[in-house]
Image: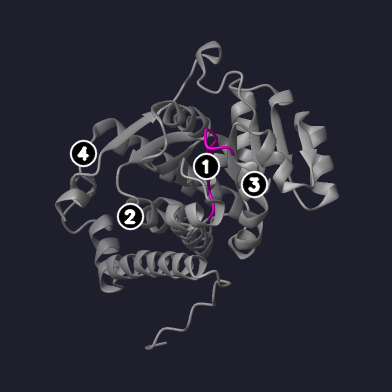
């Protein structure tokens, strides 16, 4: 338990000078250029950490390859091994279901000095090491706001990853927003249930509040703006004041007032417990995915809850 609690963390929003970028002169190979991998491509190009001519991305669909090539001016290929072979830093953005076959494809294309960064949900570094026969690995859990450079990306590097590798990872992930390095890989699995899945919880709360406002009589477009700005302002206020959420809640809860009445209903509806259950369900699913991938099996559907 001691080593778990003492996991080292580094939290920052990276803003590298392009001429000083640890990725300068490196080729970025992207295997499986899906939505999140595209966010990485867009981020590193926007920050000029690499040039378009130094990015090689693979995807099985010709239309997707054409779209990426046209939009970013990067090299595209249907050959996963080519993207890995040409990349100094290789990003794995493939789906968990195809991971065993793709890792086998890449084994012969990864020289020991290459850094491999995985954004595959549930894939542990032990599974990646076994499948790739490669040691210098970074496992990352990004989240949806990374697509607009506002994500939070928690990552773990294997002991074989050098200081130079870690700086490359830090620069690349900083292009997606905030990056948080941890010394214990278990934090990455936990983050999948908190920050990785977190936007889902926020969007559901947002939707419920908008629907409630419409039920009160607001036009939907006005309800949308009212809720969105309330959430944005509340987060900004929490960041600015650095107060505990309980203190902030107390600040806006007058005895016998509207907030007190609303909180009574939320507590009566077990909101805290429902959120905790949701986080634990996401974590259990993450561990289930990890177990399936480690065993070389396709991820199994989640069974229904016993009390469902």
Give the CA distance from mark 2 to mark 4. Answer: 28 Å
Characterize the local packing of mark 2: few (<14), some (14-19) or many (20 or more) Cα atoms within 10 angstroms. Answer: few
Which range is magenta?
A: 111-120
Residue 238: percent from the left, percent from the top?
Answer: 29, 38
Residue 108 circle label: 3
Characterize the local packing of mark 4: few (<14), some (14-19) or many (20 or more) Cα atoms within 10 angstroms. Answer: few
| Lower sequence index among marks 4 and 3 | 3
Labels 2, 4: front one? 2
Please say if the residues under marks 1 and 2 sit with CB atoms less than 8 Å apart: no
Residue designated by label 2: 186
Residue 18: percent from the left, percent from the top?
Answer: 55, 15
Q: Which image quarter: residue 291?
A: bottom left
Give the CA distance from mark 4 to mark 3. Answer: 52 Å
| Lower sequence index among marks 1 and 2 | 1
Labels 1, 3: front one? 3
Residue 117 circle label: 1
The answer to whether residue 161 is above or below residue 133 is above
Magenta-span inclusion, residue 133? no
Magenta-span inclusion, residue 112? yes
The answer to whether residue 211 is above or below residue 111 is below
Residue 20: percent from the left, percent from the top?
Answer: 50, 13
Give the CA distance from mark 1 to mark 2. Answer: 17 Å
For mark 1, give the secondary structure: strand
Residue designated by label 4: 243
Give the CA distance from mark 4 to mark 1. Answer: 35 Å
For mark 3, give the secondary structure: helix
């Amino acid at each position: 338990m001691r080593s778990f609690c003492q996991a080292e963390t580094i939290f920052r929003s990276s803003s590298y000078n392009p001429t000083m970028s640890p990725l300068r002169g490196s080729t970025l190979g992207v295997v499986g250029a899906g939505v999140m991998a595209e966010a990485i491509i867009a981020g590193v190009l926007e920050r000029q950490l690499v040039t378009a001519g130094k990015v090689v991305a693979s995807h099985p669909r010709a239309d997707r390859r054409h779209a990426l090539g046209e939009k970013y001016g990067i090299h595209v290929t249907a050959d996963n091994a080519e993207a890995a072979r040409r990349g100094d830093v290789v990003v794995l953005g493939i789906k968990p279901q195809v991971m065993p076959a793709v890792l086998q494809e890449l084994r012969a294309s990864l020289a020991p000095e290459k850094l491999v960064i995985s954004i595959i949900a549930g894939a542990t570094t032990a599974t990646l090491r076994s499948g790739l026969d490669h040691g210098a690995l970074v496992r990352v859990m990004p989240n949806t706001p990374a697509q607009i450079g506002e994500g939070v990306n928690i990552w773990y590097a294997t002991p074989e990853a050098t200081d130079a590798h870690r700086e490359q990872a830090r620069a690349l992930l900083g292009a997606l927003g905030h990056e948080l390095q941890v010394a214990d890989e278990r934090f990455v699995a936990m983050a999948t249930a908190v920050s990785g899945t977190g936007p889902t919880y926020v969007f559901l709360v947002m939707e419920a509040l908008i629907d409630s406002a419409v039920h009160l009589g607001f036009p939907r477009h006005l309800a949308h703006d009212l809720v969105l700005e309330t959430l944005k302002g509340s987060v900004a206020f929490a960041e600015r004041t650095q107060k505990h959420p309980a203190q902030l809640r107390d600040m806006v809860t007058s005895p016998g007032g509207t907030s007190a009445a609303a909180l009574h209903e939320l507590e009566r509806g077990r909101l805290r417990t429902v959120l905790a259950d949701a986080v634990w369900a996401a974590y259990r699913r993450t561990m289930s995915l990890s177990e399936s991938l480690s065993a070389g099996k396709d991820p199994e559907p989640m069974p229904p809850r016993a009390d469902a």
